[in-house]
Amino acid sequence: MPRDPKHNVLFEPIQIGPKTMKNRFYQIPHCIGAGSEKPGTQAANRGTKAEGGWGACTTEYCSISPESDDTHRVSARIWDEGDVINLRHLNDTLHSHGALGAVELWYGGAHAPCLESRAVPRGSSSYASEFEYMSYCHESDEDDIKDLVNMYTEAAKRSVQAGFDLVYVYGGHSYGPLQWLSKFYNRRTDKYGGSLENRARFWIECLTALKNAVGHEAAVVTRLAIDSLYGPDGVEVGDDGLNFIDLVEKEGVVDLWDLNIGDIAEWGEDAGPSRFYKAGHQRPWTDEAKRRARTPVLGVSRETSPDDMAQRITEGRLDIIACCRPSISDPFLPKKVDEGRVEDIRECIGCNVCIARWEIGGPPMVCTQNATANEEYRRGWHPEKFTKTSSEDSVLVVGAGPAGMECARVLGERGYDVHLREAEAEIGGRVRKVMKYPGLAEWGRITAYRQIQLDKLKNVEVHTGVGKMTADDILSYGAEKVVLATGSYWALDGTSCITHNPVPGIDASLPYIATPEQVMMEGKETGDNVVVLDCDGYFTGVSLAEYLADQGKNVTIVTGLGGVAPYTHFTLEAPNLHRMMHEKKIHEKTLHWVQSVEEGMAILYYLFRDGYKRDGSPTLGKMPRREGTDTVEIKFDSLVVATGRIPNSELCKELKARKSEWADNDIGGIYQAGDCYAPGLIADAIFEGHRIAREFESSNPQHPQPWIRERQIWGHETYPKISDREVTG
Amino acid sequence: MPRDPKHNVLFEPIQIGPKTMKNRFYQIPHCIGAGSEKPGTQAANRGTKAEGGWGACTTEYCSISPESDDTHRVSARIWDEGDVINLRHLNDTLHSHGALGAVELWYGGAHAPCLESRAVPRGSSSYASEFEYMSYCHESDEDDIKDLVNMYTEAAKRSVQAGFDLVYVYGGHSYGPLQWLSKFYNRRTDKYGGSLENRARFWIECLTALKNAVGHEAAVVTRLAIDSLYGPDGVEVGDDGLNFIDLVEKEGVVDLWDLNIGDIAEWGEDAGPSRFYKAGHQRPWTDEAKRRARTPVLGVSRETSPDDMAQRITEGRLDIIACCRPSISDPFLPKKVDEGRVEDIRECIGCNVCIARWEIGGPPMVCTQNATANEEYRRGWHPEKFTKTSSEDSVLVVGAGPAGMECARVLGERGYDVHLREAEAEIGGRVRKVMKYPGLAEWGRITAYRQIQLDKLKNVEVHTGVGKMTADDILSYGAEKVVLATGSYWALDGTSCITHNPVPGIDASLPYIATPEQVMMEGKETGDNVVVLDCDGYFTGVSLAEYLADQGKNVTIVTGLGGVAPYTHFTLEAPNLHRMMHEKKIHEKTLHWVQSVEEGMAILYYLFRDGYKRDGSPTLGKMPRREGTDTVEIKFDSLVVATGRIPNSELCKELKARKSEWADNDIGGIYQAGDCYAPGLIADAIFEGHRIAREFESSNPQHPQPWIRERQIWGHETYPKISDREVTG
């Protein structure tokens, strides 16, 4: 298909300082867990995006000095020659696809806990971080300020050596010079504090130094939180935000503005989860800034629609469309627009499991929609290319939930004859339930994308509404290989990770007790006063609570975990979930679990009700978890139980017990993907479906092939070398 | 000094299967953040202990397969040839000092979240982990069991290739085969479930396989949680615990028992913080086991007294003294016992900041007492050896808190003439306050060790009770170099990380408001109803609350953080702090902060009281943090404010302002160490004091020298290679 002419504007080149970007698709900084320490992973991940048409790709935030060390989280670093070597490999890869490379030079101040370096960060004043409450910075004197500016300059020079085309001073998310610009941090009374001109001085000194040092070879970019959302306590767009743009442009030291909003403690206001923020939620701020700025402006807003993107350029509201999560979900988005294949775009669902991995620390990024994210190098997976099989095997995939849909799609791309069979009338599996929760409708894109792709694959047949298959059905079906993807269900009896036992009195066949499926899919009625018993810890319990509160019910969440939905802290949903619960008067009782239930009442206990010992010998057997007299009663009309998940594994067990019949039926292998093997994230189920299809010819695709690990092997070089050290006592 | 004869028993060799350990000092597995991916760090850390006399040293827990991947936490791994190379370097180092190398082969089951590998663990049954609530394992069938046993066997073979002398099957902390032995996890009805014999079968199969595969070359060890502290729900010493020992010994498949107690979700019951558990708290269990076992037994209990250690051997209560934290705090403990220098032992204080880094994930281990821990390779620091200076400079250290004491000690060891001057009558600084908190008396060892060492150093003078030094005093003192270590104080006005602002109405000069110093050191009285306002997040607020509750006061902790003392989750103190608060009826109000205070009352607000927006544009400037009408009142007689710390930096600022006078006074440099530069952990202050002394001849010892980083450099080899992969689609 030819490109839609209304998208042409997205493919116009643009000048950025001394560099030309070939189009308007810009992959802004985001973390993947590779940094400059896993160079193969780093280059392949961003390189795949460059291949997919992005005109510029950046690293994650890149530390300029060990004084800015975000360990346990993984940033890039450009501290020494070893980093330059590793990042040069990234830029070589980007350039081979015609894309520019950008580096977001980062100094975290008090927000960098420096747990690896053990260095002490310097800031505008002395304060503890509101993001890392244990971490304080040192108030800089004028020597310190010179040191800091010099750190940026030296890092910029190393960046150019590494081949970067765009060099940032990063002042979004409350980092670096924003701690000088914002009154929230800066309490100085010298020429670096007080008036806007004074608070802007440090930032402008950094930009000027970069412009002088590398400006003829690289574009100088700055990321600015145009509004920190603190009202007059911080940077407001209508005040310091726009006026700062004027000040910088007067000096002529920036070639491109990268604008966003918010801080680091609640950076979900920037990287908004779809539960609260749809595409374009930052437009009010970037619109204002674009009207004021004379330099090109880029902005983010989780845009996935090329029509919207083109409109923003055409209307002069942005010069460049910056994407983070949409580029993870579909690295080939620009190419698909270019080729007029808009319907093939795998749209970001805004679940933020990508971000969750950074928040957790070290682990590599994952993506619900794109199972190949981060796997480009280490497993050799390409998001759009598949090795065609030479096998003639036909494959039966049982269950069209996340794992089954993805497995059938990838097997189809690989050339297998596939039958995907779903008991229910529609494909989607648990996505059908999840997308009904308040705010989670966009999760339906998981199904929408796969529906379109499955429809295009002539060698994949999708059969819906076929009812549950029995072992006999499967054995006699005629397929050489079988993938079971039959999912899981919520425990009917209160089994949870806390006790691993059923709870006396919980039985979801009773009228006053209901599982999430019963509430959302089967229409089981609940009374006015509802207790939601949650030990899942992610979205299910809190989503049910909101769903029921929206019906006017009085809802209390009881959880054995330390907070309601603790995993949503990692997905950046937690702060607004707190606000939602406050507004909708949803009560919570944390660190409590349920000892027993009867109609109308649950007997709860505090998990730490047992005594402790100090000095002397502890009591043998001190933590009986289930019995005790120190209890709390809670009344309810209905009890909703999201306590734990049970895999639908009986079918597989029966088929394995009848293994002797496989050969007679020409069945060469039966595998399990997703929740029916072990319950997990939707992202995990899609990954497993994908992986099994990619590795379908291995001796046992049930278990993964090794991946390429990137780490120091003893005897190989380290940086810096011992001889680089000035002194040690 | 000669060795005390009563300690001779600690230096008797002992046979362990085919190996002989030269003495009874055994460094059991503990994490340092190196694993098999930072081979230099790993070998130097354990190698220093071997040099210090430990007869055997182990790695941290060592994963046998990518199915057991604990990322974000760092374990060792023995998955491939790259790991073998790296771990062989460790064993070469250990052997060069006559120590044995041990490897704790680990399969985590449901407790391993597999965030890097994305593999799915297998267990005895299907369950979610009570430690990692998002992680479920797959219920193994008989093929899976064969796979698992084979994983252990192959890992054991690689271990022997890497030079290990002792090979573990790790079944402590609810890991690996304990999930088969314990009824808490194992719900099977086949020959691997039900009776003890059946539940023990998997474990015994693993041990038997190891004995057959490597038993002639290596000792087979198993770590057993002899009591999981769940009562009859789990393993109890008097039931499954001791009976399991009998079963295994009947098979003759174990050469050494490594015994501990507890689970993983509350593993502070094993690695007990000194706040709750003193040395020897596990003796009741290991005593029972030792009476039953015929094979040698080792046990842990944070023993630091050689008298106690020797007594346990002499009385036949243990065969080997295993240490974890005491070996971190003093790697040379055995040598000091051997040389009759018992007073030089740097005793562990049981603060568990070492463990906190593992709990946080990735970061390298730190130790409050031993600043060289983890720095042996990357900074080249030896705990007992110091490069003698050739400088004739005399050094004035101002302030004998943690940073000052350590800086003076290390400068003294390096041969500098040092005057350490302390305003108060005693050295110790903030340790004097901390050791008064309930349960924290052992923290006094920080001072006790340094007092003894300073007394021994003839070139260090300690002057106490000299009052606060002025800038004039310092300029005229006659020292060529000055280190300021003047500490910090608790904000008098309610300044915190939440708002970075004073709170209207908070003024610690008022009779009804007090800081921690005022309560603990100055005897400021508090009324019957006390509100503790805490934004420190570590031990101060909760310790004050307990101190006051012990005086019969009614105490409520109000914090802007997500829980009371969240950092104590990482130090494993949190569960028993919860129990303590429950028992002593200390109330809590979390996620609240204070808007203003008047006599008798504080106006609080919920941090997430502001509305959120779903769909449509958010409001510009949506998070004013300080004003609002949605508030909660709380009454008090006294308000104790542990909101944030303020560095004592005025002296340094004045001295820097008078830099022109330095040369006239022959002052070559003035540096700041510890809290007066930026508040931090006591461990950080000691580290900074130590580092400045080690790097005292660098161009600016205020800022650290680079350390040796260990990571992949592009172009060097990776394992496994792409060609090792069986297949990819």
Image (cartoon, coloured by chain):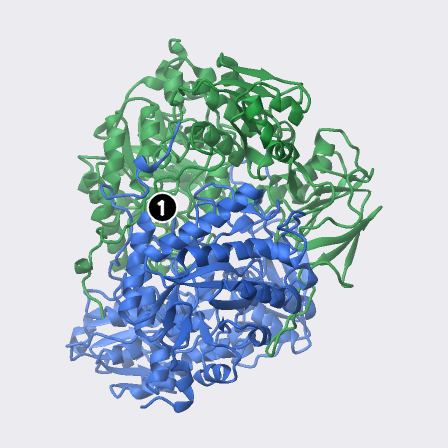
Chain colours: A green, B blue
Identify whether A629 is placed above or below B22. above
Specify whether B124 is left or right of A598. left
| Quadrant position of residue B688 | bottom left
Residue B35 visible: no
Identify whether B158 is placed above or below B473. above
Q: What's under tag 1, amino acid-wise?
A: Ser
Identify whether B398 is placed above or below B190. below
Q: How crowded is mark 1: few (under 14 residues within 10 Å), some or many (20 or more)?
A: many
| SS at badge 1 | loop
Q: Residue B145: percent from the left, percent from the top?
A: 54, 46
Q: Residue B228: percent from the left, percent from the top?
A: 61, 63
Tell me the residue that label 1 is attached to.
Answer: A75
Specify whether A530 is left or right of B396. right
Specify whether A479 is left or right of A114. right
Farthest right residue in view: A599
Residue A357 visible: yes
In depth, the one of A314 and A476 nearer the eye is: A476
| Quadrant position of residue B477 | bottom left
What residue appears at the point 61 percent right and 70 percent down from the top-left corner?
B545
| Quadrant position of residue A665 | top right
Q: Residue A551: percent from the left, percent from the top?
A: 75, 34
Quarter of the N terminus of chain B within the rendering: bottom left
The numbered mark 1 sits on a residue in which chain?
A
Q: Residue B530: percent from the left, percent from the top?
A: 65, 70
What residue appears at the point 65 percent right and 60 percent down from the top-left corner?
B234
